[in-house]
């Protein structure tokens, strides 16, 4: 459809033309006879110049009185201006008010995370959050693109289910007309049934885990994409995961330059995301964790951080010493830099506190345990791109995993670990095909056999080798955007202690 107004993102195609814009006042500068209104409409930002001589009195009054986040309609002419965001500026002819905003709680000054999280419904309008959601959208499209172009059928698994998939400790239980039910932890089991009907399928839906601890890598509600492929073994499974991730990162690098710039994302580690990803067996990963190489790597990192810390301390002291004599503009620069330095110093301090713990955890890692977040961080530091760890001890993995025919202690599972401390983004593997084995596993995991009977049918009627995995959308978004915490990777995060807004 054609809209009776122009999107800000489309303005470069309208240079020299008269346009109508509709949006919200993001920012305003100016005085007596001249105002610069920065308007945002969801597609972008544009500076609108309101000159008292060139607009009617009512328009000028609206410009002078409109508050942050007031909704406005602006009519004006588009001018090319390389110095402005988007390379254009609008010379205003008239401004009219759609709705005046009350004093807006989120201002350019710094706010605490809880303050912002309580106002997530408004925080989403901020530039950084806007950029993250655009990248999230791009990633979703990449995932669909990859699967659709490679012969997969998208199918939906139920959200209300009668059985656990990933253990019983993180189930959200509810009463389903007097029968216990759960919010699904994963669409996998139903995905397996659908793969037996269609060959290659993927599900894309919300999944739930009653995670009782607060970490920056766990949400209680998150979105997971789960491909499932008949006649695929573990190696083929790893290949699909690798191709998908390479595709996602290259699409974002190509199409989200502006968003990544807003996020100040370092592009170098993303540009290194090329196949093949190293395949590292669990055994080798354990040996690497315990090795001198790990010790040296962490020592080097500690020394580098200490040097950076000293340099930043000196810079901050110099800036403070200069401050008294500095001119206004210089003072502003020093203030901005002070905030940056303090943030970086906090991050360095945290890392310096962590490194000895990481080193201890790595050095004392015992075969048979699961990797903690720090172990994953340390492991990936040895590589410049994501790695795929495979063949884990069966005891730490789910009941449905196939055993390694070469070593019965191992399960044919695989995890993709992202670099830069992001850790596991993908978990999956080859599924057990033998009915009796699965029945024993369900029992051994203390799961009720009756509710898995439908699942056992998949092994009764034409059981075939098959594999799949789940990729966490928010983990992927957080990594690609370089976010500290998963809470910024989803519009309305659900965490323990966070149900509103
Ligand atoms: O490793 P997980 O638990 O694997 C499964 O659920 C399998 N049934 C998937 C399959 O084979 N079809 O979870 C898969 C991925 C993780 O690698 C992670 O990216 C994400 O889901 N994930 C979470 N993301 C956010 N918050 C949580 N609490 C998450 N738990 C898992
Ligand atoms: Mg996992």
Image (tube, grey):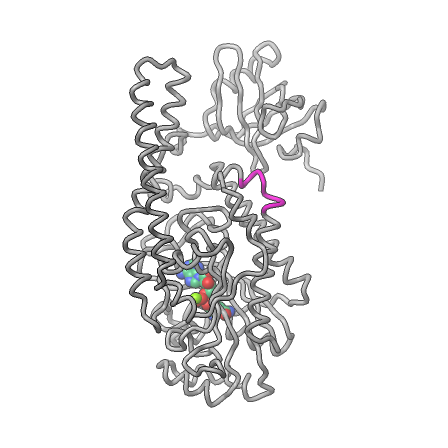
Q: Is 375 displayed left or right of 160 in the figure?
A: left
Confirm whether the magenta stretch covers residue 141: no
Q: Residue at x 58, y 81 (%)?
A: 465
Q: Residue at x 57, y 72 (%)?
A: 235
Q: Quadrant of ligand 2?
A: bottom left
Which secondary structure is most common in the magenta stretch?
helix
Residue 177: x and y in percent read 41, 74
Q: Observer-nearest residue: 215 or 316?
A: 316
Q: Residue at x 58, y 85 (%)?
A: 463
Q: Observer-nearest residue: 496 or 363?
A: 363
Residue 200: x and y in percent read 63, 71
Q: Is residue 385 above or below residue 104?
A: below
Q: In this rendering, does residue 470 appear at all?
A: yes
Q: Is residue 287 above or below residue 7?
A: below
Residue 118: x and y in percent read 36, 43
Q: Is residue 317 above or below residue 462?
A: above
Residue 179: x and y in percent read 39, 77
Q: Observer-nearest residue: 276 or 50?
A: 276
Q: Residue at x 61, y 20 (%)?
A: 94
Q: In this rendering, does residue 186 appear at all?
A: no
Circle count: 0
Q: Observer-nearest residue: 274 or 3?
A: 274
Which stretch appears magenta? Answer: 253-260
Q: Quadrant of the N terminus?
A: top right
Q: Is residue 387 above or below residue 281?
A: above
């Amino acid at each position: 459809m054609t809209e009776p107004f122009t999107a800000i993102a489309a303005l470069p195609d309208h240079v020299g033309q008269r346009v109508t814009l509709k949006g919200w006042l993001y920012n305003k500068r100016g005085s007596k006879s001249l105002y610069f209104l920065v308007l945002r409409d969801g597609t972008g930002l544009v500076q609108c110049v309101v000159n008292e001589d060139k607009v009617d009195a009512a328009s000028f009054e609206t410009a002078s009185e409109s508050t942050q986040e007031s909704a406005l309609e602006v009519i004006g002419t588009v001018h090319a201006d390389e110095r402005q965001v988007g390379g254009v500026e609008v010379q205003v002819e008239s401004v009219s008010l759609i709705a005046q905003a009350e004093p807006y709680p989120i201002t350019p000054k710094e706010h605490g995370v809880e303050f912002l999280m309580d106002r997530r419904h408004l925080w989403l309008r901020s530039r950084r959050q806007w950029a993250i959601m655009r990248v999230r959208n791009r990633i979703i499209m990449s995932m669909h693109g990859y699967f659709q172009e490679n012969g997969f059928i998208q199918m939906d698994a139920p959200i209300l289910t009668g059985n656990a998939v990933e253990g019983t400790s993180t189930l959200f239980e509810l009463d389903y007309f007097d029968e216990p039910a759960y919010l699904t932890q994963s669409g996998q089991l139903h995905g397996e049934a659908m793969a037996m009907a269609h060959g290659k399928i993927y599900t894309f839906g919300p999944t739930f885990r009653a995670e009782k601890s607060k970490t920056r890598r766990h949400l209680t509600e998150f979105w997971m994409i789960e491909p499932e492929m008949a006649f695929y073994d573990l190696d083929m499974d790893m290949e699909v995961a690798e191709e998908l991730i390479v595709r996602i990162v290259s699409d974002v690098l190509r199409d989200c330059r502006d968003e990544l710039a807003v996020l100040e994302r370092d592009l170098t580690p993303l540009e290194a995301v090329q196949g093949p990803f190293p395949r590292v067996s669990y055994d080798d990963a354990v040996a690497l964790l315990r090795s001198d190489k790990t010790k040296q790597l962490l020592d080097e990192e500690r020394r580098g951080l200490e040097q950076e810390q000293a340099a930043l301390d000196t810079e901050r002291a110099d800036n403070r010493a200069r401050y008294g004599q500095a001119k206004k503009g210089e003072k502003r620069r020093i203030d901005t830099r002070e905030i940056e330095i303090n943030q970086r110093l906090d991050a360095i301090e945290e890392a310096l506190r962590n490194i000895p713990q990481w080193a201890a955890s790595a050095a004392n890692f015992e075969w048979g345990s699961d990797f903690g977040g720090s172990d994953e961080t340390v492991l990936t530091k040895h590589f410049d791109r994501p790695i795929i760890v495979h063949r884990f001890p069966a005891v730490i993995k789910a009941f449905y995993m196939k055993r390694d025919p070469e070593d019965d202690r191992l399960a044919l599972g695989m995890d993709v670990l992202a670099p830069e401390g992001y850790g596991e983004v993908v978990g999956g593997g080859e599924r057990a095909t033998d009915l009796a084995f699965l029945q024993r596993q369900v029992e051994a995991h203390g799961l009720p056999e009756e509710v898995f009977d439908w699942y056992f049918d998949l092994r009764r009627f034409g059981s075939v080798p098959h594999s799949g995995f789940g990729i966490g959308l928010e983990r992927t978004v957080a990594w690609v955007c370089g976010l500290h915490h998963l809470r910024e990777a989803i519009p309305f995060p659900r965490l323990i202690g966070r149900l509103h807004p």
